[in-house]
Image: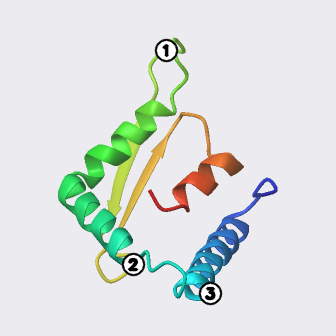
Amino acid sequence: MAEVSSRQEADAWLRGRARGTVWAHLDTREVADFAPSVKSMIEQTQREYSGRFLFELIQNAYDREPRGGGAGRVVIVLAEDEGNYGTLYVANTGKGFDAGDVRRIGSLG
């Protein structure tokens, strides 16, 4: 994946990746039906992360801070007036995502 320079490019890349994953499954489901395996993985992840999403976001921000570089910062804002349920923004001063990070986030497991 080339370097993403905008939110729109990142969104388009992720949509394309998701579409490709779904079509790959549909094309190969007669050979190997992995849906039960994926369902089990999703259920296990739901149990492990239930109620921990904010902690995980903070942990992810901490993990992106350079080692030995001093104190980093994390900002968390809940914009209650955005969207149906509000919008949660989490930002930090750590290293931004590169193409490999985006691929890992967009893949199963």
The residue at which mark 1 appears reads as 70
* Marks 3/1: CA–CA distance: 50 Å
Q: Which quarter of the picture shows residue 74?
A: top left
Residue density around tag 3, few if under 14, some if 14–19, many if 20 or more, within 10 Å: few
Q: Which mark is on residue 47?
A: none
SS label for mark 3: helix
Q: Nearer the viewer, residue 2 or 76?
A: 2
Decide which of tag 2 and tag 1 comes sooner along the chain.
2
Which residue is at a point 32% across and 46% down the rendered structure image? 56
| Coordinates of residue 42 in the picture (x, y in percent) | 31, 67
Q: Which quarter of the picture shows residue 10?
A: bottom right
> Would residue 29 appear left or right of 37 to someone viewing this image?
right
> Would residue 60 appear left or right of 105 to someone viewing this image?
left
* Image height of 54 relative to 47, above or below: above
Q: Which mark is on residue 35?
A: 2
Q: What residue type is disc 2 on? A: Ala
SS label for mark 1: loop
* Image height of 53 relative to 9, above or below: above
Decide which of tag 2 and tag 3 comes sooner along the chain.
3
* Marks 2/3: CA–CA distance: 13 Å
> Would residue 11 appear left or right of 51 to someone viewing this image?
right
The residue at which mark 3 appears reads as 27
SS label for mark 2: helix
